[in-house]
Amino acid sequence: MKIPNSRIVKNISWNVSGIALAKVLTPFLTILIARKVGPNVYGTFTLALMIVSSVDVIKDFGMSEAFLVTKNKNLDIKFYTYLTSQFLFSLLLVFVIILVTVFFYSSLGSGQVIIAVRYLSITILFKSISEPLIIINQKKQKYSLLFFRTLIPSILNALIAYSLVLLGFELNALIIAYISSEFLLAIFFSLKSEIKLTFKLEYNIFINFFSFGKEVIIQRFFTGLILSKWDIYALGYGFSETIIGLYRMAQNLMVTLPRALIKEYNQVLYTEILEDRSIEKIKNLYKTYVLSSSIAIYLVAIIFNIYLEPVVDFLLGSKWLNAIDYIKSFSMILPFIPMKYFHLSISKMKGFYKKYTKLYMIYGLVFFIIIYFLVMKMNPIYISIAYSFLDILFSIIMYFIFLKNQKHVRFLKIHILMYLVYFVTYIYLVINLL
């Protein structure tokens, strides 16, 4: 089957370029903000935002994935059910967070962190409106509109925060900017989306979505809470906000940002495959778009490591040079990401998604235990090395599960060579850090 390359390239361009443009433009302001507020304030905000964003693990019951793969029949009522359930549950979560932070303020640790959590929790409600609208536009392949979903909050967040920092605010600048940007994103998609915001809940649809979504919830618990946030919580327990700030800045540069871009890149390929689910199309897309992007990312990561110190000094300033070791330890995660996302996407379509759920559970428990004990070693670089090692190991295991559960997309020799080169490079970097 001939793949409509022009449409794929067009959709990838729209989907990735909005994120890429936001991530290219906002770092200049973010760098200026980081120079002003320093690692301590940045670390305090990071910890507060991490606590609030933890509810993303469960707040939509996995319905975003269920809605994305559902058939288009009665799509409007399915969307209303998805929107309504997410909004109601988000409202409950906001109420609980505010209640806890008001009545248990004295026993919850850092006062600045707790106050920040209380105010940032309102963004959960804004996201319960914007995220369903983003998902339905994604399902309809309205990628020209999705171009703005990251660009708007990122640019506005950076501009508002920098303006307030110049006026003398520090932590409050970051809080106000984040709340404002999420609110304006919800307004934008409410006005621009073709579907109207209507709150209506169909019980049978909700149950069907939830049945599919429970696997997603389990995976999100381990990926969205333990694997994405436990290391930050652990650092908060054993180290200062300054260490958290350095660690998180490195993680944002080498893990969070690249993953966001590659995830959207993969999402276009996934929606393209879902049109007719052709094996030939899957093989061609995997070879043309996935394997090639992994090799390109590896080469970029190597070049970045060579010139890392002058780049960090120039961009962030000398106070951030202590983040360099963390950046190096995270860098070899990058080339594994395109394949990992594609394997996960195909597992949903081919029906072996539960195999990855079990793997995520084991991975999450191992990660939890290892990070807990490494905090006691009082050297945060061990945490970043463990994070990257387990992520790479998990990616390799995912590929072999992928091989076992489908027979058409393999490229075994290429994968072995790529994984060997990536892993040897990672070991070399780690040896030089210890």
Image: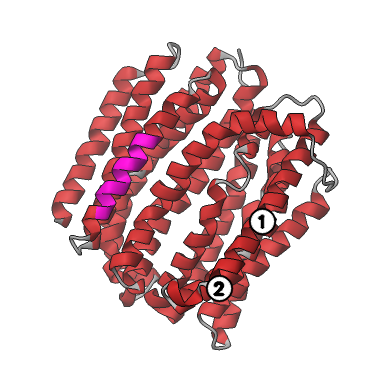
Residue assigned mark 1: 92
Q: Earlier in the sequence, mark 2 or mark 1?
A: 1
| In the image, residue 264 lies in the stretch drawn in magenta | no
Given this view, does label 2 or label 1 mark the residue nearer the observer? 2
Instruction: Tell me, yes or no, if residue 127 can be seen here.
Output: no
Instruction: Tell me, yes or no, if residue 21 can be seen here.
Output: yes
Give coordinates of residue 9: x percent, y percent: 61, 34
Magenta segment boundaries in residue numbering: 361-372
| In the image, residue 368 lies in the stretch drawn in magenta | yes
For the point 38% across and 54% down, the residue is 230
| 56 horizontally vs 433: left or right | right
Give coordinates of residue 290: x percent, y percent: 46, 30
What secondary structure is found at the residue carrying circle 2? helix
Q: Quadrant of the N terminus?
A: top right
Q: Crowding near pointer 2: few (<14 within 10 Å), some, many (20+)? A: few
Q: Main secondary structure of the magenta part?
A: helix
Give coordinates of residue 177: x percent, y percent: 61, 72
Residue 408, picture quadrant: top left
Q: Crowding near pointer 1: few (<14 within 10 Å), some, many (20+)? A: few
Q: Nearer the viewer, residue 91 or 148?
A: 91
Residue assigned mark 2: 103
Up-down: is 268 above or below 385? Answer: above
| 426 horizontally vs 117: left or right | left
